Structure formats: structure tokens, C-alpha cells
Image (cartoon, rainbow, N blue to C red):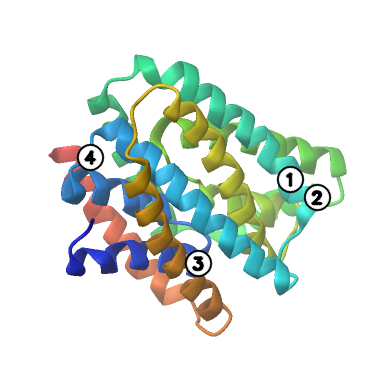
């Protein structure tokens, strides 16, 4: 079990996930490796399950608020599930722990940079020209799901920071519905990746359930607060935090 001060960290991880629709995994993996002391692959597997449970609970809450677009989410989610399972099952066994951590750290740094310096207008101009092209939109979502799912399987990241923009730009979802829908997609991909990991490595199931319950509690708190708090400043603070984490993991 975790010491009392450490109990707050999983709750905070879930809080971030509920507030901004992503970010749970990029905090969970470093915490499990450097503080809890798990092996790399076990940390990725634990992260997938914990974030999957928390995301599912958050998605149910958003569904009760009509902030979840089920059909489009499932379409995105199934392509991501397939990629997540296949990459975790057949690609991960050939990757060293060191390489996985480096890939994870680079991804964290990229996410942080995008959050700090993204220019939404340029993306809107590119995608708006295709806004009435249904085939383009769904093809874009399908391949986005494959891409994000592959990342999820390799480094245990749910991909909320990639899913939310894909739903918003390709399928023209309002940002609140994109966040709610992303949580369902994260859950689908995370559970798929976890199933592949648990076939390959021994896992501490009791710890996984205990840790997941704390993350889920935080996710619920974040979901409740998401409609009452402007998350712009939170995202900038979170991005700086990711920069520090990514640099630490890459250099350590």
C-alpha cells in the first residue's frame, strides 16, 4: 500500500484526467517507475488499467451531461483498440525498457511543447476546408485512432492530448463533447493494451485495483469541476510540469 503523502499523487493524476480530458498516463508512468519502484513494463501496464478505469468513470459522468458522442467515439475507439493490442502484444516484447522510457520521455516533451505553443487558427484553416467532406473526416479519425492506439500500446499513454484535437477538428465536436468522448476512447484503448501486457508479464493485481481506485476518485472530482473551472491556465502549468518530467526522464 501507499504511504499517506503518496495517496495524494494518484488522486491528483485522476484530477488532471477529469479536468482536461488527458494527461493521466504521462503523470502515472513516471510516478510508478521513480516513486513506487515498478519495472518499466509493469508501470506501463498498471498505468493503462488505472487510467482506463478512471477514464471510463469520467466518460459515464460526461454522458450523463450529454457531453459524449457515442457512435463517433466507438468508431475512433475500435481502430485505437486494435492498434493498441497489436503493438503491446507483438511490438513491445522486442523493445528494451530503456528505449520505451526514451520514447515516452520524447512524447511527453512533444505534448508539453504543443500545449505551450499551439496555434489553433492555423489548424482550423486547414481542416475547415474539409469540414463538409464526411469521407475525409472519418478516414482522418480512423488513422488517428491507429496512430494513437499504437502509441498507447507501446508506452501506456491514453493519448487524450491527441484524441481531443482529432475529434474537435476532424469531426467538428465542440470541445466539451470532444473531452467527454476522448475519455471513452482512452478507456477502450487502455483496456485493450492492458490485456496484451498481462499476457506477457506478471502483475500485482491487488495494487493495480488499489491504485486505480485512487486515480478514479480524482477523475470524478476533476469531472465535477471541469464545467466550473477555466482550464487554460491549468493546461499551461501542466505543460511546464511535463517539460520538467520529460527532461528528467530523458536525461536520467
Kindly indicate the quadrant of the structure image that contains residue 12.
bottom left
- In the rendered image, which residue does mark 1 sit on? 74
Specify which label sits upstream in the sequence, 3 or 1.
3
Task: Give how far across and how far down residue 130 sits, in percent.
Answer: 79, 47
Q: Marks 3/4: CA distance?
A: 25 Å
Residue linked to disc 2: 71
Using the rendered view, name the quadrant where residue 178 is placed. bottom right
Mark 3 — residue?
18
Task: Quadrant for the C terminus, please.
Answer: top left
Q: Is residue 107 visible?
A: no
Alpha carbons under labels 4 and 2: distance apart: 37 Å
Taking the spot 40% from the left edge, 21% from the top edge, the residue there is 200
Which secondary structure lies at badge 4?
Answer: loop
Other residues around mark 1 within 10 Å, as few (<14) / some (14–19) / many (≥20): some
Q: Mark 4 or mark 2, which has the lower sequence index? A: 4
Q: Would you place residue 70 above or below residue 93 in this image?
A: below
Amino acid at each position: 500500500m501507499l504511504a499517506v503523502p503518496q495517496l495524494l499523487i494518484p488522486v491528483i493524476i485522476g484530477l488532471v484526467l477529469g479536468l482536461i480530458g488527458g494527461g493521466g498516463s504521462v503523470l502515472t508512468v513516471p510516478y510508478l517507475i521513480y516513486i513506487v519502484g515498478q519495472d518499466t513494463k509493469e508501470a506501463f501496464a498498471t498505468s493503462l488499467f488505472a487510467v482506463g478505469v478512471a477514464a471510463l468513470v469520467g466518460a459515464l459522468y460526461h454522458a450523463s451531461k450529454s457531453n459524449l458522442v457515442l457512435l463517433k467515439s466507438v468508431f475512433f475507439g475500435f481502430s485505437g483498440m486494435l492498434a493498441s493490442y497489436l503493438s503491446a502484444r507483438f511490438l513491445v516484447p522486442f523493445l528494451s525498457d530503456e528505449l520505451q522510457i526514451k520514447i515516452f520521455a520524447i512524447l511527453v516533451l512533444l505534448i508539453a511543447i504543443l500545449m505551450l505553443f499551439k496555434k489553433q487558427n492555423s489548424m482550423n484553416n486547414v481542416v475547415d476546408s474539409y469540414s463538409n467532406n464526411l469521407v475525409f473526416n472519418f478516414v482522418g479519425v480512423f488513422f488517428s485512432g491507429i496512430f494513437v492506439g499504437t502509441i498507447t500500446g507501446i508506452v501506456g499513454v491514453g493519448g487524450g492530448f491527441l484524441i481531443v484535437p482529432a475529434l474537435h477538428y476532424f469531426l467538428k465536436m465542440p470541445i466539451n463533447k470532444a473531452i467527454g468522448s476522448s475519455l471513452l476512447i482512452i478507456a477502450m484503448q487502455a483496456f485493450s493494451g492492458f490485456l496484451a501486457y498481462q499476457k506477457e508479464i506478471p502483475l500485482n493485481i491487488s495494487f493495480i485495483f488499489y491504485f486505480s481506485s485512487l486515480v478514479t476518485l480524482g477523475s470524478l472530482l476533476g469531472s465535477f469541476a471541469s464545467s466550473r473551472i477555466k482550464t487554460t491556465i491549468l493546461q499551461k502549468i501542466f505543460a511546464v510540469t511535463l517539460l520538467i518530467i520529460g527532461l528528467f526522464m530523458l536525461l536520467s
